[in-house]
């Protein structure tokens, strides 16, 4: 099981995609930036280690709640990770 604020389980190895969703930097020990596409209903989370994951069929309200959360990593762990299908956008920086 990954540590708090880490990307999905290793067994969830989806296809790598290219992102054009703008992400906004956030204050978090585990998350670096968050983006959302209303058109795609997709939430993107960039981790401090450089990995980026896109979560599919995420309601806009979840994005708003995440951005307003006092602890974004805790909100991610409780409400996003494992609750939505994810796609790998970019591997961790040390995976290159």
Image: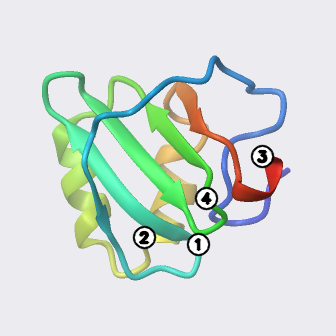
**Left or right of residue 11: residue 70:** left
Q: Which residue is mark 1?
A: 30
User: Looking at the image, do the residues carrying marks 2 and 4 touch, with CB atoms under 8 Å apart?
Assistant: no
Q: Which residue is mark 3?
A: 96
Residue placed most toward the observer, 3 or 31 = 31
**In the image, residue 7 lies at what x, y percent?**
66, 49
Q: Quadrant of residue 20?
A: top left
**Of label 4 and label 1, which has the lower sequence position?**
1
**In the image, residue 19 lies at what x, y percent?**
38, 33
**Left or right of residue 83: residue 23:** left
User: Looking at the image, do the residues carrying marks 2 and 3 touch, with CB atoms under 8 Å apart?
Assistant: no
Numbered disc 2: secondary structure: helix
**Of label 2 and label 4, which has the lower sequence position?**
4
The disc label shown at residue 50, or none: 4
Q: Nearer the viewer, mark 1 or mark 2?
A: 1
Residue 93 higher or lower than 37, as above or below: below
Q: Residue furthest front?
A: 96
Q: Which residue is mark 2?
A: 72
Residue drawn 47% across the image and 69% down it: 32
Q: Quadrant of residue 58?
A: top left
Residue drawn 45% across the image and 27% down it: 18
Q: Give the spatial CA distance, label 2 vs label 4.
A: 17 Å
**Of label 2 and label 3, which has the lower sequence position?**
2
Q: Give the spatial CA distance, label 1 vs label 3.
A: 20 Å
Numbered disc 4: secondary structure: loop
Residue placed most toward the observer, 90 or 39 = 90
User: Looking at the image, do the residues carrying marks 1 and 2 touch, with CB atoms under 8 Å apart?
Assistant: yes
């Amino acid at each position: 099981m990954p540590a708090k604020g880490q990307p999905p389980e290793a067994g969830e190895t989806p296809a790598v995609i290219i992102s054009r969703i703008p992400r906004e930097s956030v204050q978090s020990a585990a998350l670096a930036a968050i983006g959302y596409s209303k058109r795609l209903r997709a939430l993107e989370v960039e981790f401090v280690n450089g990995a980026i994951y896109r979560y599919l069929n995420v309601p806009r309200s979840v994005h708003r709640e995440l951005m307003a959360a006092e602890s974004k990593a805790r909100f991610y762990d409780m409400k996003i990770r494992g609750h939505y299908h994810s796609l790998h956008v970019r591997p961790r920086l040390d995976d290159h």
